[in-house]
Amino acid sequence: MLSWSTVIAAGLAVTGTQGTPVELAERATPTVYLAGDSTMAKGSGAYTGWGDYLSKYVTVPVVNKAIGGRSARSYTNEGRFAEIERLLKRDDIVVIEFGHNDGGSPNSASDNGRSDCPGTGNEVCKSGKTGETVYTFNRYVETAARMFVAKGARVIVSSQTPNNLFEGGTFNPGVPRFVGYAALAAKNVGNGASFVDHFRAVANMFLKLGSARTNALYPSDHTHTNAAGADQVAQAFVQAVSRDLNGTTPLKPYLRSPVPVVF
């Protein structure tokens, strides 16, 4: 994929000798790849992820690679980050969003294959079930992000969506530790990575909606939304990008107008 500087240089070259402008091919747009769990993945009914709704609000193609039940660890071990890396072209954008399945401890004999090692650095654990070396959430996410950046892609580390914060009727804005971990991952990767606090954006949206309207978006459990909820969660992500809620991301130039306002 050509950068704008390459296109401009090429344009100067073809007009320099003859003085007659030559029409250049339009710059190709990036593709957005999504890596996450069921809250982002394609679904239906009461288990609809927000990823398939993102394309309504952006002008570039979206490829949803989110898979239900995955954590940063299991997504890595199944080769799914590597699959995205093979597809990437320069300037593509990858949104990484995990956290719902990353908790717990891998040390027990009933290790579910998803729990990360506690910590945010180079801590390691051993699976009590398989003996596998288990790394931290940050190591899995940061390793994937650096791999994508090395390919010339841009990465958005997004914090997990909240569970139903009005479960029980009272707003409870408790923040899971993986929200802070996601912000730290983007900071640690540095150039080529940015952070979107999707948790905060959706929480603000729920507070605006109120208890009854929020609870209606969770017909089955406190984690998964119906289609209407998934659409609104996607809108909250887009509004956060539009408002630079946590700094500018590479997706901002590709938002459709008008940008939704849900919080």
Image (tube, rainbow, N blue to C red):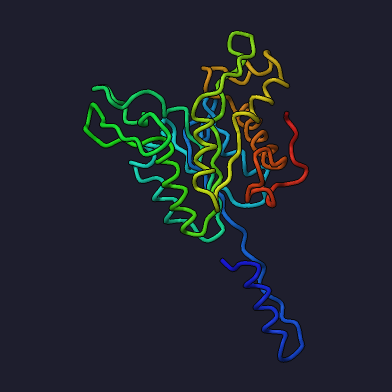
Residue 32 in the image, given as x and y percentages of width and height? 56, 50
Horizontally, is 229 left or right of 140 in the view?
right
Residue 142 in the image, given as x and y percentages of width and height? 45, 44
Q: Residue at x 70, y 16 (%)?
A: 210
Q: Residue at x 62, y 21 (%)?
A: 217
Image height of 258 relative to 177, above or below: below
Q: How many marks?
A: 0
Image height of 140 relative to 112, above or below: below
Residue 41 visible somewhere in the drawing: no
Quadrant of the snapshot with the N terminus: bottom right
Asked whether 222 or 61 is in front, the reply is 222
Q: Quadrant of residue 126?
A: top left
Image height of 256 relative to 222, above or below: below
Horizontally, is 208 left or right of 164 in the view?
right
Residue 137 visible somewhere in the drawing: yes
Residue 18 in the image, given as x and y percentages of width and height? 73, 91
Q: Residue at x 47, y 53 (%)?
A: 148
